[in-house]
Image (cartoon, grey):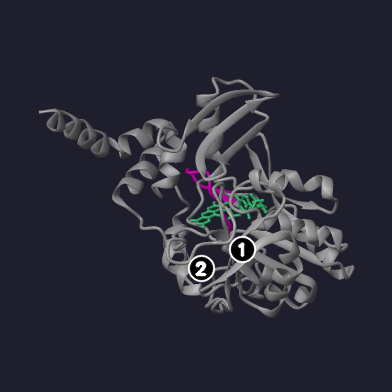
């Protein structure tokens, strides 16, 4: 894998060692047409455990699924962060699960999980893999015939910035202080918070923080995210989870509160249905229509648009400007428009 100037890794074939076996194409998550299926059902859900609920990004579906998998003797592969180092890890004990909680809005590195995951499947253990849709497809194709005991949960995803962008941004806003913990969400609130030990050294909401602002506007993603083949209603996983944006609680109220976030769960296969059955005792859950979930979440319909501002940001960053400066320049027109509206609005 080789990193480009934006910090994204791409596979490069060593032509002198290639024997043209075609295995790289067979396992590539985006080569050929992926085998996708329309969800069987939609559920709105939140964890019944308030502690669990309040520390999760949405309604805690990922967390409850992971707990059940481990309690029934299985293994979970999910995304953890150590400071700004964000990667997938293997967890086989309940004590390891808090590290997986929370969305980390950056590309998570998968290196290091493929072989242990294969070993777990060969040992006959149930394995739950949670990740972005492209990561799920990568694992699915890698596992191939071993996938009987593999449970795949993909997140609804609007795209990922690179680890290099995050590291550089964090170093600049933390004034070089060591960052042990970072978090991107506080329930329904989108904010970047950085902690050194127990002390919070930086906290800014998504409109004030340049990394977050660029992320929310879809300016800083890997190029493939703008033509993502998985940003559609049909899915490549056993179950899709995300936020239940746009749920119509006015006409069809939920029988439970969800002020700090609400999960959507879309089982796609029989395995996905079994996962929902397995966790329903630990979740407040209500059946909704798949259409309602798809209509409320643009990432279930199409990929993020590759905007002019985004192209400016990525080009300036690739040409050596700092992330913050590149982001500010790409949003100059918006800033000018805001100033203009303020002045005109005052008269
Ligand atoms: C980059 C990204 C973009 C997203 N975009 C959308 C969106 O547009 N619409 C939407 O409805 N939902 C989106 N989500 C999903 C949403 O933010 C929550 O992660 C999801 O609803 C799970 O929340 P939870 O409460 O069930 O889980 P939690 O208990 O909070 O657990 C979070 C789970 O997400 C996994 N995870 C965290 N960060 C990453 C990462 N960087 N890469 C892979 N896996 C990760 C962890 O392994 C864990 O299992 C996105 C998530 C990510 C990471």
Find out whether residue 3 is within the magenta segment.
yes
Q: Position of residue 231 (x, y in %)?
A: 47, 66
- Residue 317 disc label: none
Q: Position of residue 63 (x, y in %)?
A: 71, 54
In the image: residue 56, left or right of residue 274: left
Q: How many marks?
A: 2
From the viewer's side, name the closer residue of 284 and 54: 284
Q: Is residue 78 above or below residue 136?
A: above
Q: Which residues are magenta?
A: 2-13
Whether residues under marks 1 and 2 lie with C-beta atoms below 8 angstroms apart, the answer is yes
Give the image quarter of residue 318.
Answer: top left
Q: Position of residue 81 (x, y in %)?
A: 67, 41
- Residue 154 disc label: 1
Going from N to C along the chain, the mark reached first, 1 or 2, is 1
In the image: residue 342, left or right of residue 273: left
- Residue 230 disc label: 2
- Within 10 Å of the Cα at label 1, are there few (<14), some (14-19), or many (20+) other Cα atoms? many
Q: Residue at x 84, y 54 (%)?
A: 92
């Amino acid at each position: 894998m080789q990193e480009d100037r934006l910090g994204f890794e791409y596979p490069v074939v060593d032509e002198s060692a290639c024997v043209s076996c075609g295995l790289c194409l067979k396992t590539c998550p985006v080569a050929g047409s992926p085998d996708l299926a329309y969800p069987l059902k939609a559920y709105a859900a939140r964890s019944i455990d308030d502690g669990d609920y309040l520390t999760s990004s949405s309604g805690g579906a990922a967390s409850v699924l992971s707990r059940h998998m481990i309690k029934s003797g299985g293994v979970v592969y999910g995304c953890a962060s150590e400071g700004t180092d964000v990667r997938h890890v293997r967890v086989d004990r309940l004590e390891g699960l808090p590290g997986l909680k929370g969305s980390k809005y950056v590309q998570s590195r998968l290196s290091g999980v493929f072989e242990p995951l294969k070993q777990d499947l060969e040992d006959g253990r149930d394995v739950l893999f949670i990740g972005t849709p492209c990561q799920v497809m990568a694992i699915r194709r890698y596992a191939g015939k071993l996938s009987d005991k593999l449970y795949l949960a993909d997140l609804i995803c609007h795209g990922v910035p690179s680890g290099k962008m995050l590291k550089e941004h964090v170093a600049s806003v933390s004034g070089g202080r060591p960052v042990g913990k970072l978090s991107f969400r506080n329930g329904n609130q989108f904010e970047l918070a950085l902690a050194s030990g127990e002390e919070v050294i930086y906290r800014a909401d998504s409109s004030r923080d340049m990394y977050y602002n660029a992320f929310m506007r879809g300016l800083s993603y890997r190029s493939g995210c703008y033509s993502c083949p998985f940003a559609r209603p049909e899915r490549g996983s056993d179950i899709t989870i995300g936020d239940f944006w746009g749920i119509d609680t006015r006409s069809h109220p939920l029988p439970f509160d969800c002020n700090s976030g609400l999960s959507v769960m879309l089982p796609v296969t029989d395995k996905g249905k079994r996962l929902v059955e397995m966790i329903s005792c630990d979740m407040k859950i209500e059946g909704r229509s798949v259409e309602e979930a798809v209509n409320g979440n643009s990432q279930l319909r199409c990929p993020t648009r590759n905007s002019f501002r985004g192209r400016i940001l990525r080009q300036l960053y690739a040409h050596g400007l700092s992330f913050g400066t590149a982001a500010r320049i790409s949003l100059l027109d918006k800033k000018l428009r805001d100033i203009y509206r303020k002045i005109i609005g005052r008269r």
